[in-house]
Each structure stands twice: as C-alpha cells, then as structure tokens.
Amino acid sequence: MSKNTIVVGCQWGDEGKGKVVDMLAEKADVIARFQGGANAGHTIITKDKKLILHLIPSGVTHEDKICYIGNGVVLDLFGIMEELEALKSEGISTKDRLFISSAANLVMPYHKLIDEIEEKKRGGDGIGTTLRGIGPAYRDKISRCGVRMADLYAPERLKKKLEYQKKIKGEYLTGSDDDRANLEKIYDDMIKLAPIFKPCITNVSIDLENHHKAGKSILYEGAQGAMLDIDLGTYPFATSSNTTVGGALTGLGIGPKMIDEVVGIVKAYTTRVGGGPFPTELVDDSGNRLREAGCEYGATTGRPRRCGWLDIVSLKHACRINGVDKIAITKLDVLDGFDKIKVCTGYKLNGETLSEVPLDLSDLWDIKPVYEELDGWDKPTAGLTKFEDLPENAKKYVNYMADSLNVGIALVSTGPKRSDTIVL
C-alpha cells in the first residue's frame, strides 16, 4: 500500500469495498470517508462476526486508527447512533478517534418521507432509491438550504432553517401526520443529539493536511461505484454524489497531491441493485447461480441484486475516470465450478461495435454485449491465500482482467473473511 491510497468501486457498487478497506486499514494511520450516505452498506466479517456499516468508515474495527467523515457525506445522525451501539456491543470504542466535518449536511427525517413519496410518484419509472433520504438531502445541499452539523450548535439558526423548510416543502409536510413531517419534534431531537456529537466536530480538511505533513498514511474510502456517479455514471439511474476520485477531493477538502495510489474494487462478475441499464445482466440459471453463490442481496435494502458477467467495457470507463493504478478483485470464488465464463469485451449498437462506453449513456439500454468465452475451473478457490495455489484457469482469468484494463493487481479476495485473501 502506498502512503495515501484511495479505494473506489469500479462497477455499480457492492464490489466488496468494506472488506478491502478493512484490510488496507491495517497499514494506514487514518481512514476518511468522502461521500455518500446511509445508502451505502459496507460488510466486514472479522472473528466470525459480521458488521454492516453505512456511515462510519470501515477501518473503525482497527482500534488504533483515526476515522473521519468528510463534508461530502450526508449524515443520518440516528443511523450513526445505531452503528455506534452496534460497535459498542462488539467492544469497539470510537472515543477520541471518530471525527465529523462541521460542514457535513444532515439527512433529516423529512428527507426520507420525501424520498418515499417521490419514488411512489415515479411508479414503474422509479430509479430504485434506497429510501434513505439521500437524494433529497443532497438536493437541499445544492439548493443551499440544507442543515449542516454546525447548525446543531446554533439553535436559533437551526430553528430558522427548519421554519424555511416548512415554507418550501409544504406539499410534503403540511397536514401530514407522519412524525417525519413534525418539524418541532425534529428540532427537539436534533438539540438532544447535539451534545453527543460535539466532541467529534472538526475541520476535516485541516486535520488531514496535518496528518499528511506528519507523515501519516491516509486511506480514503468512498461509497457506491463509478457507474453510479452523478456525472459520469448511468444518469439518471445514479446516486446523488460523485463516487469517483474527484469526490474525495471536494468531499474532504484535500488536494490531488495527497493521493498517491488509486485502488479500484472489481467484483469477478457484475451486479447492480435497482433500476437502470445493465448490459451483461443474466436473467437465467447462470444469473440465479451467481446471486445465490455470491449471497447477492443488498446490505442496505436486502433487495436481490441483478447479476451478470464481467463487463470490461464499463470497467475501462471506470478505470480511466478514476486513474486506477491497481485493482482488488473480489468474489473470485463465486465463479468456482462454472464450465465456461463469459466476459463482455465490446458493445453492439446500431450495427457498430463499440470498445468504449457510448457518449450518451442512455444508449446502454439498447446495446448488445459482445462476449469472449473463457474456460472455467472445477477446483475450489474459496479460502486460498496464495496465488500459486489457484487453479490454472483462475490464474488466467485474474491476469486477463488486469491485462484488459492495463492495471496492476493489489489483491484477490477468495471469501468474505479477512483471511480469505491473496495479497500480491
């Protein structure tokens, strides 16, 4: 691991970032989360215990590490409280090592209510939101009417902001008997939470610069994946933030020279949750087999994930826009036992073969994948920790991925546990 490493997802999220960050955190001094919200779900399995974190950086399980949540994250304080309780029950303390940007915007209860109402209005054209209020919270941020962490410590300002919400969100809040529309209750709840989080509030940008100057190693953690980026992903079927490297710069207040290496997380096949185009999706026995073998159900929503073959074309797009140096390949073991494995190497669109993602990403609805078929392997890879122990065709598959993307390989995950990993 380089001194300062950023971990980004290279598909539609759910690539296994939680495990990779958890592992890389062993060699880092500081872990910083830069975007997203509680719509992310990072699963960590350690000592046969499973932890699912949505907001707190995945490296928190290492008790000597300092963790930051940057201004690019939208925070659900009630969600963080639940995560803190879960960590406490496992004997993991965050005292004096979990810090939050004062500029981070908050996901308020009414954001979740609005999320639900708007998704219902979309009907069959729903974008598959997690209903965690992320989109409405980011919308308030961009509209410059959001509530920030700093507002909790200025009660009169907080009250005025909530009064303004009543004016601009009347169609959602007025006359509603849903507690999430009760702004007086929300104000009281926020004031009660304020002293709990007071010791955590900091200027993350300055803190990270000081750590950098002191020679500390920093690990930057994102959420979701590159193909869900609000600008560079499959818009409008995307998340509400920049999931790519640029999101780390603005979401933490750091300069590009504070990132030394980009590690892209790539699942050995492809999955997607919610709506949107998915060129290699399998709606057959192979897709079901991938889903069941890979336990492909959302850590946040529990929804079954859509599954398909590896898509080299979209991965090239993700690696380019992130400047990926190395990939971490996850869930290789899920492909154990497949006689043949297909890899998408091109897209057919209007009689033309494309080697890159189309300029208009909405064209992904209409493309037909061009596949190359590779030989599978019949020996298990699950739990292997040495590259030389992999079946020959599994080695070829891993090298094929790296060569196709012109990147190095950081590690190969062969199971959910920390120990189920080949480090290269």
Image (cartoon, grey):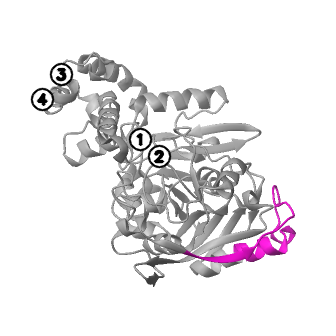
Q: Is residue 195 above or below residue 102?
A: above
On the image, numbered disc 1 is attached to which residue?
Answer: 100
User: Along the line of sight, which residue is nearer the eye, 248 or 260?
Assistant: 248
Alpha-carbon span between mark 3 and mark 4: 9 Å
Q: Say which element carries label 2.
A: strand
User: Along the line of sight, which residue is nearer the eye, 66 or 272?
Assistant: 272
| Labels 1 and 2: the sequence-earlier one | 2
Q: Reply yes or no: does residue 371 show up in magenta.
A: yes
- Do the CB atoms of the residues marked 1 and 2 lie less than 8 Å apart? yes
Q: Nearer the viewer, mark 4 or mark 1?
A: 4
Alpha-carbon span between mark 1 and mark 2: 6 Å
On the image, numbered disc 4 is attached to which residue?
Answer: 167
Amino acid type, callout 4 = Lys
Q: Reply yes or no: does residue 260 show up in magenta.
A: no
Amino acid type, callout 1 = Ile
| Labels 2 and 4: the sequence-earlier one | 2
Q: Say which element carries label 3.
A: loop
Q: Say which element carries label 1.
A: strand
On the image, numbered disc 2 is attached to which residue?
Answer: 68
On the image, numbered disc 3 is attached to which residue?
Answer: 174
